[in-house]
């Protein structure tokens, strides 16, 4: 990353405070969350927390902890409101201080994190360290599902919702902090390839990278109900599933470890199940077979996430657009 293309966002390190001890509740009446508000949903074992965009707009990082195979592991969820991108990383740090903070710097208008152990800088959308002793290190990523609160609650009614104790922070979470930025064509910081107008700058797209190949699936181009696209990106057979009206999209590798390549069809009105394959397995939105001969099998996560078009084309110019 050329140093000349890194910009100071203004607040300075930790000027945007990461959440260190997240608080969750199932008493949703205590919040102002509305059915159409966007959340970042996570499913790890029996844990299905949701992180509202309205809170992430003001904090950008939540350092959290989950149990993996009987062991507690630290994770960091990051969300950049200027690029509309959310990424969840497993911690790989060996010290007691495994958390990440907001550096206050931006590359292509996108969040640069820093880890508190080594002070290395990390590009969220490149998903790797770009400065410091961890340079080029790539963390293990975990799947997230971005969707409306209404859709997430229908899929996982047992969910817990990230809350904020007003005594800890005093932000106006009911007010979006960037004015009309989500819908207009404005840029607050320079980005590469800003003249790629094949899509509106703030169009939310599901993007995937496979080697040197990149492709995006605009969420608005999925059907109103659940739709499925059996596709190939680079040398990988993938399946993308999404819904414009229910506001979600995910993409997985559809070749299994035994080299079987599955073909999928959509499943309607049975969330979180979203598709069925040609063997009769039924798969949920996190890529897990919930029934059928391969029950318990998980589709391989891809290098993919949702972002604004302005960011995807800045980081991955020339991306193909699903029509």
Image (cartoon, helix red, strand yellow):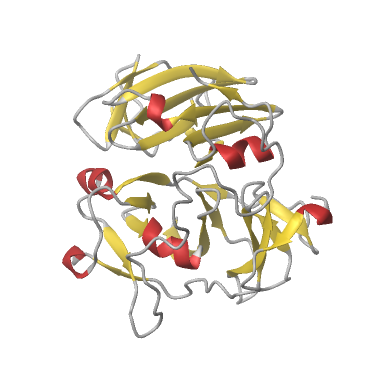
Nearer to us in this view, 15 or 18: 15
Q: Residue pushed farthest bottom?
A: 167
Q: Which picture quadrant has residue 267?
A: top left
Q: Residue at 37% across / 71% down in the picture?
A: 172
Q: Residue at 39% across / 79% down in the picture?
A: 170
Is residue 237 something one can see in this rendering? yes
Percent position (x, y) of residue 139?
Answer: 64, 52
Percent position (x, y) of residue 180?
Answer: 44, 52
Q: Residue at 66% across / 38% down in the picture?
A: 194
Q: Residue at 63% across / 52% down in the picture?
A: 109
Q: Which picture quadrant has residue 317?
A: top right
Q: Is residue 248 above or below residue 102?
A: above
- 25 vs 8, left or right, is left
Q: Is residue 265 above or below residue 48?
A: above
Q: Is residue 171 above or below residue 33?
A: below
Percent position (x, y) of residue 153?
Answer: 23, 49
- 126 vs 144, left or right, is right
């Amino acid at each position: 990353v050329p140093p000349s293309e890194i910009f100071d966002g203004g607040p300075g390190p930790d000027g945007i405070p990461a959440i260190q001890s997240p608080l969750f509740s199932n008493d949703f009446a205590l919040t102002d969350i509305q059915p159409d508000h966007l959340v970042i949903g996570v499913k790890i074992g029996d844990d299905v927390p949701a992180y509202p965009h309205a809170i992430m707009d003001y904090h950008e990082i939540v350092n959290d902890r989950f149990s993996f195979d009987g062991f507690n592991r630290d994770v960091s969820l990051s969300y950049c409101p200027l690029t509309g991108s959310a990424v969840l990383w497993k911690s790989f740090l060996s010290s007691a201080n495994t958390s990440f903070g907001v550096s206050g710097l931006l590359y292509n208008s996108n969040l640069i994190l820093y880890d508190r152990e080594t002070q290395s800088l990390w590009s969220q959308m490149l998903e790797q360290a770009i400065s410091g002793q961890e340079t080029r290190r790539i963390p293990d990523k975990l799947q997230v599902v971005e969707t409306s609160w209404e859709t997430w609650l229908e899929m996982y009614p047992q969910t817990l919702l990230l809350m904020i104790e007003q005594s800890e922070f005093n932000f106006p979470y009911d007010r979006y902090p960037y004015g009309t930025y989500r819908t207009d064509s404005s840029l607050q910081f320079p980005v590469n390839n800003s003249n790629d107008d094949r899509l509106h700058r703030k169009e939310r797209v599901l993007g995937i990278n496979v080697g040197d190949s990149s492709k995006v699936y605009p969420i608005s181009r999925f059907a109103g109900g659940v739709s499925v696209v059996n596709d190939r990106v680079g040398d990988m057979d993938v399946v993308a599933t999404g819904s414009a009206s229910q506001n979600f999209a995910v993409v997985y590798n559809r070749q299994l470890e035994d080299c079987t390549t599955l073909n999928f069809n959509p499943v309607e009105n049975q969330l979180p199940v979203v598709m069925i394959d040609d063997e009769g397995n039924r798969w949920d939105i996190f890529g897990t077979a919930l029934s059928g001969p391969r029950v318990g099998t998980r589709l391989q996560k891809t290098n993919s996430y949702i972002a604004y078009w302005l960011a995807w084309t800045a980081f991955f110019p020339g991306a193909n657009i699903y029509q």
